[in-house]
Amino acid sequence: MPDSAGESGVGSWSSDGLAQGSIVTPMTVANEHERIGKCSHNRHVHFPPEDKIVSGYHEPKKPPLFDETRSVDIEEIQQAYRMACMTNRLFPDQNVEEQIKTFHRFGSVRQESLSLKGQRMSNDHINCLEDIFRRVQFDVVDFQYTFLDDDMAVSLGEMIEFYESAVKLNISFNNEIKMRGWQAICRAVKNNPCLEELNMRYSAINEKVLSLLARTLRSQPSLVSLHLENVELTGKKMLLLSCGLKPNTVLRELYLGECGLVAADGTHLYQLITSNTALQMLDLRHNRLGDEGFRHICDALKHPDTIARSSLSALVMWNNGITSASMDCLAHALKNNPKLETLNIGKNALSVD
């Protein structure tokens, strides 16, 4: 019996494909590389004509909104939610399960609300909710103070956009949402024709986010009510918001309480009031506009464009550092503008010394 590979006639090969014991020369290496680079037979790649590449497609499945023939299966929703939690290795949220039990069974009517208010959420928790959103829609979706970050805001925004899950969305008191998260929320606002109210109170919003929001408002989304209370808006941010709302003909209510607005911001409010034709209620409570800023607003109220085209009928100026010095300007504005029906100027030093 031969006692070596060489004696058996079978060569021993190294990892680079060369026979062990052979003399390696540049020509040997070149020949080996050439051998490896060649195929044993010719191969050809064929592509179909352009119009044949896509043979068909399926629309993504959306929930059957307002289907009078459909009955909401509460047990199915409960089971689907539990399975999603099991897949993500989470315990089902007791609060969510209790809310599912209260769902009505009418397929043609939205559920009243889904509230996670005050709960510390994670992205996995939000992904589990998709099995609810794909089956039912809500009037109110409340994620107030749920510690949302970018990833969670993206997941939530995509669901709200695709499933048209909410008429009113509350994401206030979430300061960890950054640009990527706000982009998803703004896409939902722009593309969801059912979303009418957005509550962003106590949010950390920089100029880039405000610019994004302004572009979204300029695109005429279905948004009717916008809450921006306690969001720092003075200066350029207020300018961006005013510019975004100038051409908007849908928004009816704008809440800007406690936004740090000062006298100089009165010029931006002047532009907003004189150019916007849809806004009916403007809430500016707890700012620092003072007499100077308030005079800009009064000048806007009596402007011919405002009188001719504006819909503004309610103005709240509660606690703005206004004094009796600006009352003559207010009186002149009220005399010329018959459209203003409600004016709240409480908690201002209006007494005459």
Image (spheres, rainbow, N blue to C red):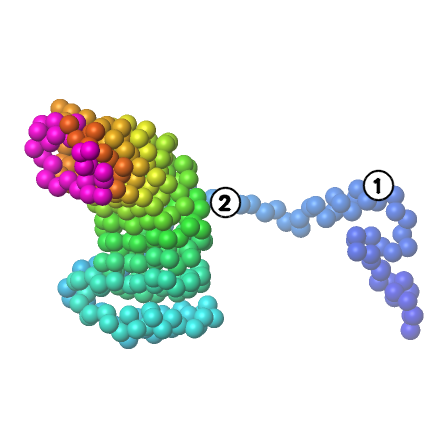
Q: Nearer the viewer, residue 13 or 265?
A: 265
Quarter of the figure that contains the N terminus: bottom right
Q: Which residues are magenta?
A: 329-353
Q: Nearer the viewer, residue 191 or 278?
A: 278
**Quarter-of-image position of residue 116:** bottom left
| Amino acid type indicated by mark 2 | His
In the rendered image, residue 255, in percent from the top left (x then y), is placed at 25, 44
Residue 343 among those drawn in magenta: yes
Q: Which element carries disc 1, helix, strand or loop?
A: helix
Tag of residue 170: none
**Quarter-of-image position of residue 262:** top left
In the rendered image, residue 174, in percent from the top left (x then y), is placed at 39, 53
Q: Is residue 344 visible?
A: yes
| Amino acid type indicated by mark 1 | Met
Q: Residue furthest top?
A: 304
Q: Nearer the viewer, residue 114 or 286?
A: 286
Horizontal arrangement in the rendering, residue 139 relative to residue 82 (left or right): left
Asked whether the beta carbons under mark 2 and mark 1 sit within 8 Å of each other, the answer is: no
Number of numbered discs visible in the structure rendering: 2
Label 2 – label 1 distance at C-alpha: 36 Å
Residue 249 among those drawn in magenta: no
Instruction: Look at mark 2 in the image and give the residue it sits on.
Output: 46
Tag of residue 27: 1
User: In the image, what residue occupies the spot 23% across and 34% down?
Assistant: 323
